[in-house]
Amino acid sequence: MNNNLDIENRVLIIAEIGVNHEGDYSRAAEMIELAAKAGADAVKFQTFIPESYISTSQKERLERVRGFSLSFDEFRNLAGKAKEENVLFFSTPLDFKSLDLVNEISPIIKVSSGDINNDPLLEKTAATGKTVIMSTGLSTVDEIQKAISSLKKGNPDIVVDRKLILLHCIAAYPAPEEEVNLLSMPFLQEKFGVHVGYSDHTKGLLACQSAVALGARVIEKHFTYRKENQSFHDHHLSADPAEFKEMVDSIRRIEKMRGTYDKHPMPSELPFKSHIRRSIAAARDLCPGELISEKDICFLRPEIGIPMSDRETVLGKKVKTEIFKGNIITEDNIDG
């Protein structure tokens, strides 16, 4: 997978490693390998300085987040590892210094749902000129509009240059199926005129598969090396390597089935056209010299004579040669 996004023609499938490495660099590197083997186009992490992300008043939470963090040099090495595995590397920066690093090592910058109202971070993110993928969990339409306005302050052309992708997201862990609301995707696309995708927090694969059928250009699914015997909650709503590969395979099939936004006969249909459509036929025995009326005709398969849609050209015409009941009427049977 190269750094040129081709989401017009191919769904970008992201393995959201996030912090499922739980601060273990070796595990993070291994997960990149596993994601690549499972068919991921990209791997995504979260990059942060804990003290710039969590209040010191939440000591237990801050300590846990510190345990999940990786150093900037480790992220640089992970970006190199992703390149070796031929997958796209990017991350969600959660503070300004982390944004500088992500801008240095990644062609894409992800904005989390939690920062959709973080105007300074949004403006600086857009100012990098990189493609921005923004999740919209917990957001109202007005909040999304304000976020896009902030992004435009940093890069006025971010929308017209197709450098903004909105991900529909339900910021619950796990998200209940009855609240997934996938129709938000076509709504967001029409409302804001940008590419849309889906960031998933449900258990299982159905939501991601359905999102592709509804037009998602990007799918982001949490990824883990193992779900069993894990205490951290993200593992349980993640796909393991086997599940992720199943999802990738199904998405590649669905994107083929999705096709294009129009309606026309497909090549495979054309050989069946004459077989399933009807011709004008005689509803009774017709003798030479008779004038054909509505009651004299019926419509029978196959379409090898005059199509039923052209019946007006037959009505009132004189029969030239005898036509038996049930026979298809041809141009040779009537006077022009």
Image: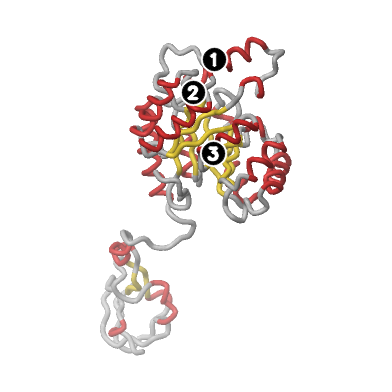
- Label 2 – label 1 distance at C-alpha: 21 Å
Q: Earlier in the sequence, mark 3 or mark 1?
A: 1
Quick one: SS at disc 1?
A: helix
Rendered image: mark on residue 67: 1
Q: Residue at x 57, y 46 (%)?
A: 130
Quadrant location of the C terminus?
bottom left
Image quadrant where residue 135 sits: top right
Q: Residues within 10 Å of mark 2 (few under 14, many from 20)?
A: many
Q: Residues within 10 Å of mark 3 (few under 14, many from 20)?
A: few
- Furthest residue toward front: 73
Tell me: residue 167, above or below residue 309: above
Q: Position of residue 301 (x, y in %)?
A: 31, 66
Relative image position of residue 237 (x, y in whole percent)? 49, 23
Residue 28 horizontal side relative to residue 329, left or right: right
261 left or right of 53?
Answer: left
The disc label shown at residue 104, or none: 3
Q: Earlier in the sequence, mark 3 or mark 2?
A: 3
